[in-house]
Amino acid sequence: MGTDLEQSPAPTIDLVVNTYRGDVPFLEVMMSHITRALAEAPLRERILVVDGSEPVGRFKDSSEARAAMARLTAIADRLEGSGVIDRVHMLDWSDERVEAVMRDWYGDPEAPVSCRAGTAVYQYCSAVDASDADYVLHLDSDILLHSPDGGGWVAEAIALLKAHEDAIVVQPMGGPPIAMTLAQVIFGPRARPARPARGASPGGSVGSRMFVLDRRRLHSCFLPLQPAKSGDRWEQAMTSTAARRGFRRYTFWDERTYASHAFTHGPEFVRLAPDLVWATEQGIYPFRRSGYRWDVRVEGWHKWPWVVSIRLGRLARAFGSTTLGGKTRFGGVGV
């Protein structure tokens, strides 16, 4: 009979969240939401990875990106002090560290630290390396996560990575249901085909915003990355490397858990962030909306489906409306 000493130790997984000074206006709201959404996940540490570098590329002229580094540091300290996160990891931009990371990830210490458009490359590599756990759950700080099981799906993601040797990352469904056909626009969710109860399928590109990754597999048989073109984005390099090495992304089929992200970080998103968090946690969303399924668009006229859905959802909650599938009839099912 085996003893406890003979049993394999439980795998470890850390949460790592990338942030930079442009996230200051919404960081506390979003990090508190992420922590609540993952309250039951088997996380060892929750790590906030703070990039203090000067913003470049398409983000360099945004008002959020010019937010003072002192404010970002103060917010990170408050999040750590209140227990929302366990540790703040400041990105190391010393030449020695940058060269070591880029050598490990790209096989070249002189590899570009940003893509052609100026978006992050080194930051994502360093975020994964901020943890020494067996697995990493990575999120950007603008992720909205509907996770009614409190993050129990994370353990399922680890089990899936163990079961499939060709899996490099696992992610939940991107965004809540959305009308995709004219019939669905007219008749609503009842015009959608039935969804599987649970399961996952391989395929699709590797995204940078949210994933569960096997760090041991990454470093033992995946790296260095092989971009299709010089200056490719980090997620493009991950996707092309996966294709060349025979690895794949797996995505959960069902919609019990889904992740969305802000399409822009403008004033409307900052103003609506608390309401969007509430709606996401309640499973309330506009079925008829614009953009890709995983985008939360609130700029200009795109905001109105969300605003109406949130207002009706709050009214339904206030008056004790009956629910369907955990969502109010006025929210994810009826709007």
Image (cartoon, rainbow, N blue to C red):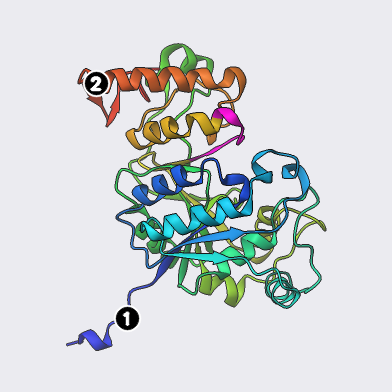
- Kind of residue at badge 2: Ala
Q: Nearer the viewer, residue 300 or 207?
A: 300
Density class for disc 1 (Cα within 10 Å; few <14, some 14-19, many ≥20) is few
> In the rendered image, which quarter contains the C terminus?
top left
List x then y, in percent, for residue 280: 40, 35
To which residue does mark 1 refer? 8
Q: Which residues are magenta?
A: 260-268
Does the magenta run of residues contain 5? no
User: For the point 65% across and 71% down, which residue is it?
Assistant: 223
- In the figure, 212 relative to 64: above or below? below
Q: CA distance from mark 2 to mark 1?
A: 49 Å
In contact (CB < 8 Å): disc 2 and disc 1: no
Position of 265 relative to 318 (above/below):
below
The residue sitting at 37% across, 25% down in the picture is: 332
Mark toward the start of the polypeptide (2 vs 1):
1
Using the image, determine if residue 246 lies above or below residue 10.
Answer: above
Asked whether residue 261 is drawn in magenta, I would say yes
Tell me the residue that label 2 is attached to.
318
The residue nearer to you, when weighing 47 against 195, is 47
Q: Is residue 59 visible?
A: yes
Residue 269, located in which quarter of the rendered image?
top right
Q: Position of residue 306 (x, y in %)?
A: 47, 23
